[in-house]
Image (cartoon, rainbow, N blue to C red):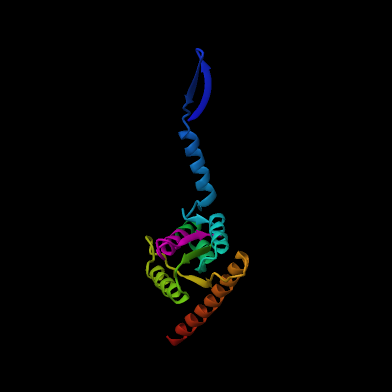
């Protein structure tokens, strides 16, 4: 609604001009969706996740940052095709969204995800992620694909006294994820040796 004063028949008057902006609003909503959401998984994308991360850092919030990586995605793509690989990615994104209702989960790369959650201790976050990891491993999906589904993750607690940049925190969480991945492979090999 636009309001315009005018002079009409020697009197002061006001005109109201109504403009239908519903098409423009739909277009803007579509652009907003493209800007903030990953097209494959329909969860938040890297752009949105980094905005939230930087916002929480500037506000001095206490939260955990988790960097998660899908295990064996290249093998799945090579052996079963990219369509199955896409289903694997979608399934992992759904599992990660079960962390909590208020967590921000975003896909930041092909097989990489970032999860941000406030009011969680490091131990609580590890426990919840292990539950989700086990749920993923025990659910083979619709086609009962002949491969193990799993994720590796690294978690960094971030406090109000944090002085690191977002990129430094991501690098630290990424390194923790690789430590987890190496430890898991070592455990897995030793279990296979027991048979």
Give the number of marks: 0
Report the residue at 50% width, 52% height from top: 37
Magenta-drawn segment = 88-108
- Outermost residue, top direction? 9
Question: Does 29 sit left or right of 143 as displayed?
Answer: right
Q: Nearer the viewer, residue 46 or 152?
A: 46
Q: Is residue 95 above or below residue 15?
A: below
Report the residue at 46% width, 70% height from top: 150
| Residue 181 appears in the rendering | yes
- Outermost residue, bottom direction? 194
Residue 161 spot, x, y in % from top left: 57, 71
Report the residue at 56% width, 57% height from top: 51
Residue 187 spot, x, y in % from top left: 48, 82
- Outermost residue, front direction? 11
Residue 133 spot, x, y in % from top left: 43, 71
Residue 47 spot, x, y in % from top left: 57, 55
Q: Nearer the viewer, residue 49 or 59?
A: 59
Reply yes or no: does residue 167 show up in magenta.
no
Report the residue at 48% width, 38% height from top: 25
Residue 110 placement: quadrant = bottom right
| Residue 70 appears in the rendering | no
Residue 103 placement: quadrant = bottom left
Q: Nearer the viewer, residue 122 or 18?
A: 18
Reply yes or no: does residue 103 show up in magenta.
yes
Query: Which image quarter is the C terminus in?
Result: bottom left
Q: Is residue 38 above or below residue 164?
A: above
């Amino acid at each position: 609604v636009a309001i315009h004063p005018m002079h009409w028949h020697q009197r002061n008057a006001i005109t109201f001009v109504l403009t239908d902006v519903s098409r423009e609003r739909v277009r803007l909503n579509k652009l907003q969706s493209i800007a903030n959401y990953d097209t494959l998984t329909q969860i938040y994308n890297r752009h949105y996740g980094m905005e939230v991360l930087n916002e929480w850092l500037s506000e001095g919030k206490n939260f955990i940052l988790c960097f998660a990586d899908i295990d064996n995605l290249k093998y799945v793509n090579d052996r079963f095709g990219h369509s199955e690989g896409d289903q694997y990615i979608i399934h992992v994104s759904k599992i990660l969204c079960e962390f909590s209702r208020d967590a921000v989960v975003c896909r930041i790369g092909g097989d990489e995800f970032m999860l941000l959650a406030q009011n969680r201790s490091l131990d609580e976050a590890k426990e919840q992620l292990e539950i989700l990891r086990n749920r993923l491993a025990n659910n083979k999906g619709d086609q009962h694909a002949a491969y193990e589904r799993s994720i590796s993750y690294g978690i960094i607690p971030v406090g109000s006294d944090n002085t690191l940049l977002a990129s430094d925190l991501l690098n630290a969480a990424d390194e923790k994820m690789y430590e987890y991945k190496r430890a898991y492979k070592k455990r897995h090999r030793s279990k296979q040796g027991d048979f």
